[in-house]
Image (tube, rainbow, N blue to C red):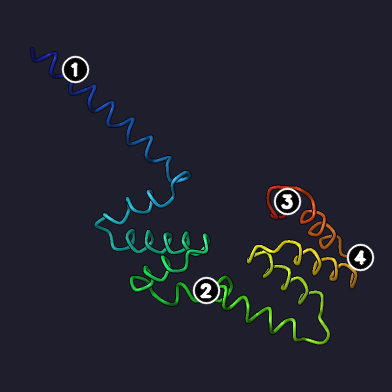
Amino acid sequence: MRLKSIIRLAVIFFLAGLVYLNQSHTRFIYPLNYYRHHLASLSYGQRYYAILQMWYYFAQKNDWSSAYALEKYLDPNDLTYYKSTHHPNDIAQSLDRLAAKPQKTIEDNLEIARLYLIINKPDLAAEYIKSAYNQDPVRSDLEKYYLRLVSPSPSFLPAN
């Protein structure tokens, strides 16, 4: 009788370990579940980091209403740069400011292309990269960016 209970207990611990290992890999598939798990931590640092990562997740998905709901738990200094470079209102202001320039430099054209990529307008981004390439055809990185953008590749990440 005692041996059976020890075997049952061992099987239960083994299955619990398998469930734990299975959940540890879900952070790559279900990032919100992973961060929600850390919200119950006793450590303030882990809770803060989990809330910050959830905020980044919602901001990257362009779900700013959910991101705003988490801001009251976060330090505004941690969010300022990302909001200034990815929030739709700030992107529109930056595009207006750069478009108003009479003489655009190569860097201006690349910045406009980057902003158009953030708001998911790759056709307009390709036009500005092409304009930058026409200004300086010697730069091979501009040609690579343009070809990568107009090719049917799955992402616009520079090759390493």
Q: Which residue is drawn at 34% across and 58% down?
A: 46
Against 87, residue 51 (above or below) is above
Against 104, residue 51 (above or below) is above
User: Mark 3: few, some, or many residues within 10 Å (few <14, many ≥20)?
Assistant: few
Is 61 positioned to the left or the right of 6 in the image? right
Q: Where is residue 106 in the image (x, y as percent from the top left)?
A: 81, 74
Which residue type carries mark 4?
Val
Against 53, residue 1 (above or below) is above
Element under disc 1 = helix
Q: How far apart are marks 3 and 2 (CA)?
A: 27 Å
Element under disc 4 = loop
Q: Quadrant of residue 141?
A: bottom right
Element under disc 3 = loop
Is 84 positioned to the left or the right of 96 in the image? left
Against 48, residue 34 (above or below) is above
Q: How far apart are marks 4 and 3 (CA)?
A: 19 Å
Q: Name the residue under label 1.
A: 7
Element under disc 2 = helix
Q: Name the residue under label 3.
A: 159
Q: Which of marks 3 and 2 is nearer the N terminus?
A: 2
Q: Which of marks 2 and 1 is nearer the N terminus?
A: 1
Q: Residue at x 35, y 64 (%)?
A: 48
Q: How far apart are marks 2 and 1 (CA)?
A: 55 Å
Q: Are marks 2 and 1 in contact (CB under 8 Å)?
A: no
Q: Residue at x 37, y 71 (%)?
A: 74
Which residue type carries mark 1?
Ile
Q: Name the residue under label 2.
A: 83
Q: Which of marks 1 and 3 is nearer the N terminus?
A: 1
Q: Are marks 4 and 3 in contact (CB under 8 Å)?
A: no
Q: Do the residues labelled 2 and 4 touch (CB within 8 Å)?
A: no
